[in-house]
Image (cartoon, rainbow, N blue to C red):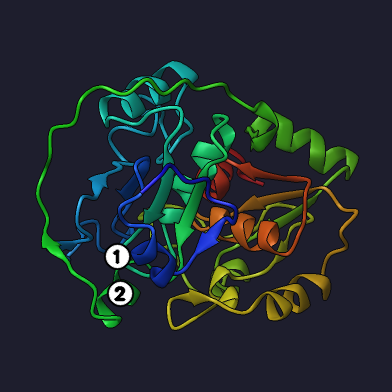
Amino acid sequence: MAKIIVENNLVTVNWLQDHFNAENLVILDATIGKVIDLESKTSLQIPNARFFDIKKKFSNTDAPFPNTFPSEAQFQAEAMALGINKSDAIIVYDDKGIYSSARAWWLFKCFGHDNVAVLDGGLPEWVAKGYKVDRKHSKNTPKGNFKAKIKPEGIINLKMLQTIIDEKSRTIIDARSAERFNGEVPEPRVGLRSGTIPQSINIPFLELLENGKFKPVDELQDIFSKKLSKEQELVFSCGSGITACVLALGATLTNYKRISIYDGSWTEYGTLITK
């Protein structure tokens, strides 16, 4: 099958099956565990999938907070080591349906690779449809020629966030659950205080999903339009920069354009800002 270009940011498992033999298709398993369950329990993978290690390869592990945005040089080197090429069409999934796959999608977007999409429903949907799976295993691939070119507007750091708060220049949306956002339950990360970023509003990322897949676009549009307008410039946050990217993907699917992620999210803000 000839090379393909992914025309949507979200694809179905049927689409992936139909394009499985495309010459430039790369499938990435971006599964991570949650804070309270750091290890994935799934021993299966989609055939030919390569492991996109968010925690150890595609984050700055020297940073004090988890999942910190890597440098351009690091991202390029690790993508090349995975055998990823500039012309590849990348499909990213995880074992929870929609969770950490959106973080991998956002990273590729921020480093200039637009030929990338998230697999709607991820591994659970692939299995439910009866498509072939393999046992997880590592696979050596020839070094790729991927080139990273950072788009800095996609990531907000703490200093930038403070300016946004002071100037009220953008709308900050928190993807955590309403209970966490309102301080009604403790944060799952041990020692992290409860609270919210000043002026932020709450759209829990799970509100965008149903049975591990995104709700239809018209329903997503309704969720966002109740709190946002298309003219607003948006900054998404969460606990540690993972599920904020689910909101970013949902907003992209509904044609919001001016989007960024606060990389440190509540883990950084709640640790460093005590008032």
Residue at 24 percent across and 50 percent down: it is 49
Tag 2, which secondary structure?
A: helix
Give the CA separation, mark 1 to mark 2: 6 Å
Residue holding disc 1: 95
Q: Is residue 186 above or below residue 8?
A: below
Q: Which residue is most to the front?
A: 1
Task: Kindly identify the amino acid type of the residue bearing the numbered disc 2.
Answer: Pro
Q: Are marks 1 and 2 in contact (CB under 8 Å)?
A: yes
Tell me if 35 is positioned left or right of 42 in this view: right
Tell me if 96 is positioned left or right of 51 in this view: right
Residue at 72 percent across and 37 percent down: it is 161
Tag 1, which secondary structure?
A: loop
Q: Where is residue 55 in the image (x, y as percent from the top left)?
A: 31, 41
Q: In this view, does 7 lie above or below 43?
A: above
Q: Is residue 250 above or below residue 22?
A: below
Q: Where is residue 178 in the image (x, y as percent from the top left)?
A: 60, 75
Residue at 54 percent across and 29 percent down: it is 111
Total count of labels: 2
Residue 60 picture quarter: top left
- Residue 241 shows in this picture: no
Task: Kindly identify the amino acid type of the residue bearing the numbered disc 1.
Answer: Asp
User: Viewer-proximal residue, 2 or 93?
Assistant: 2
Q: Position of residue 35 (x, y in %)?
A: 33, 58
- Residue 85 shows in this picture: yes
Crowding near pointer 2: few (<14 within 10 Å), some, many (20+)? Answer: some
Q: Position of residue 194 (x, y in %)?
A: 54, 60
Residue holding disc 2: 124
Crowding near pointer 1: few (<14 within 10 Å), some, many (20+)? Answer: many
Residue at 83 percent across and 65 percent down: it is 228
Tell me if 267 is positioned left or right of 151 in this view: left
